[in-house]
Image (spheres, rainbow, N blue to C red):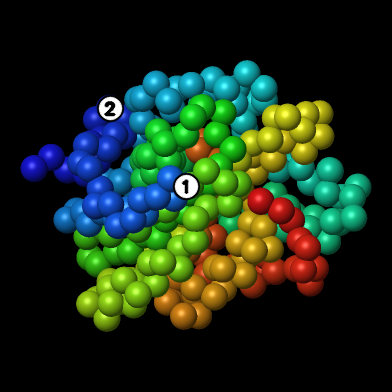
Amino acid sequence: MLPLFQIMAGVCALTTAPVVLEHTSQELYESWTIPDGTALFEAGRPETENYANFLAWVRASVNPEQTALLERQRKIYAASSYSEEVKKFDLILSHQAGRLHPSRCLEAALFNEHLMRQDSAAVQTEFAALILTRGTELKIYFSSGFATSPPTITKFEDRLTVDLKAGWSLLTLLHNHIFFFKNAPGDIAGTTIPSGADVDTFLDYAQRFGLKEAWITNGIDTITLTASEFERFRTTRSDSLAE
């Protein structure tokens, strides 16, 4: 059997179909179990037409360098009624919390899995994934939809509970943030900063399931937050930074 992911010369591709857990007209829930997922944490991007079109769509509107996107959005929030959110930007931009890096094979391949279901490479919808490890084994629970928020991951919780009892650990919760180029010259988003809802979910899963990290990707770059950093991104406003 071919491995789930194939990485050759920095290229990352899905080569095995996932197990479909549930599929409706609006939502898809899938899972993979990979005997050795070590290579998935290396650099690599899908060589697909959809992914190439996505990159072209982004680069036609903005230089997607993540620090510049964060600085751009920070100015907008500093001048708005959401000024408390600025502290999140400062934590990241000053390297106090969170680590920015190019998306690895794992994030890029799952982003591409989501992208393949969309009507256009101008994707303005979200996916989410729970990623578990046990030694070198990797297990992925993936949800994809057609809304600006991902389908609920709570549907995986019963399976997750069983997995944890079987020796798996919850490495990360991954989801994507989208670009809003229709808002130009205003807030075009594309940033990997966690929203208030994101932080609440991270803290909840850390408490209940031992979540170690959270990853947010825009399909090009990713931020990694450790569980010890989650609380630092909490704000007192209930209407904090939107997705």
Q: Residue furthest left?
A: 1
Residue occupying the point 22% across, 65% down: 135
Kind of residue at badge 1: Gln
Ranked by sequence position, the earlier of labels 1 and 2 is 2
SS label for mark 2: loop
Residue occupying the point 27% across, 38% down: 14
In this orientation, does residue 100 appear? no
Relative to 64, is 152 on the left or the right? left
Relative to 49, is 223 on the left or the right? right
Above or below, 3 against 57 in this view is below
Above or below, 73 against 185 in this view is below
Residue occupying the point 78% across, 58% down: 85
Q: Quadrant of the N terminus?
A: top left
The residue beneath circle 2 is: 9
x and y, in percent, of residue 37 in the image:
25, 52
In front: label 1 or label 2: 1
Mark 1: few/some/many CA within 10 Å (<14, 14-19, 20+): few
- CA gap, disc 1 and disc 2: 35 Å
**Most foreground residue, 177 or 96:** 177
x and y, in percent, of residue 86 in the image:
80, 55
Kind of residue at badge 2: Ala
Residue occupying the point 57% across, 73% down: 203
The mark tally for this picture is 2
Q: Which mark is residue 26?
A: 1
Relative to 7, is 217 on the left or the right? right
Among the 4 quarters of the image, the one containing residue 204: bottom right
In this orientation, does residue 45 appear? yes
SS label for mark 1: loop
